[in-house]
Image: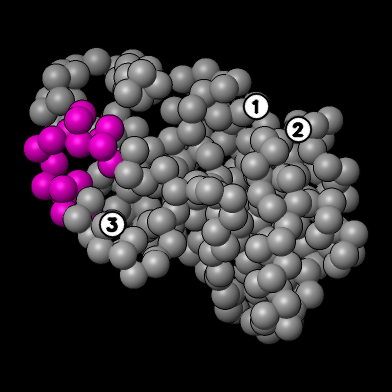
Amino acid sequence: MGLTLQAIPCRTDNYAYLIQDIESGRVAVIDVPDAEPVRAALSAAGQGLSDILITHHHDDHIAGVEVLREEYGAKVWGAAADAHRLPRLDHALRGGDTVAIGKNTATVIDVTGHTLGHIAFHFADAKLAFTADSLMILGCGRLFEGTPAQMWDSLCKLMALPDDTLICSGHDYTRANAAFALSVDPDNAALRARIEQIEKDRDVGAPMAIAPLTLEKATNPFLLAGDAYFKRRCGFDAQPDISVFATLRARKDRF
């Protein structure tokens, strides 16, 4: 089974993601911050669009959904818990449900925290996870609706995915997140090396919102909140994981 991936920059710092099941040719998009860049990518590839997968209700993730639904007749999938503030859903999802795109199946993960009802999509065979504004590159989403405990629980679910999972997040907040991570964890050699590589990748136009989970687990301070060595070197000592996470999230809000 094969699944192709295309990251599509939208607005000033958003990403939409096009995936295609190679065997069937079925094409889906994860989040639609703006219809035009997605339409342009589909047109360039001579593709249709069968499905629209929504992670959460914020306008910069759903603004183009209705335009693409009308133009391509795509079916819309999103969280049942968020249905009252999403575009009309053809399929309402809960954590543990599955979504089939041709021969490729995604498991729905409830990642409440950034918003209530935020979901992620994990395509295990393709080793892809679309996390939007839950787990982000070198960071995590601001807690607009959920609690620190909810977000930490969500991040723990994502950390339990296989290390070679490619995390596809919703925004390029990489520079700001990297600056915060370095302020918290300046002695992390892997983090310093990663920041250097990120700038090289940016120079050649690589997508800035995608990274392997194993790299996030080594360098993202929010994922390190449960790591004993991180706690010692950053002055958190024996504090509970959730307390460390909550402190980090509050600091980032003020950073």
Crowding at dot 3, Cα within 10 Å, few <14 / some 14-19 / many 20+, comes out as some
The verdict on residue 41 being magenta is no
Task: Determine which residue is flagged by label 1.
Answer: 116
Please provide the residue range marked out in magenta.
178-194
Which dot marks residue 198? 3
Looking at the image, is mark 2 or mark 1 earlier in the sequence?
Answer: 2
Gap in angstroms between the C-alphas marked 2 and 3: 34 Å
What residue lies at 73% left-to-right and 83% top-to-bottom? 46
Q: Secondary structure at mark 1?
A: loop
Quadrant in which the C terminus is drawn = top left
Task: Look at the image and say whether residue 187 sits in the magenta stretch.
Answer: yes
- x, y percentage for residue 161? 44, 51
Q: Amino acid at mark 2?
A: Asp
Which is in the foreground here, disc 2 or disc 3?
Answer: 3
- Identified by mark 3, the residue type is Ile
Q: Are marks 2 and 1 in contact (CB under 8 Å)?
A: yes
- Identity, as a three-letter code, of the amino acid under mark 1: Leu
Picture quadrant of residue 115: top right
Find residue 99 and report its horizontal and vertical position in percent. 72, 57
Residue positioned 43% across, 35% down in the render: 140
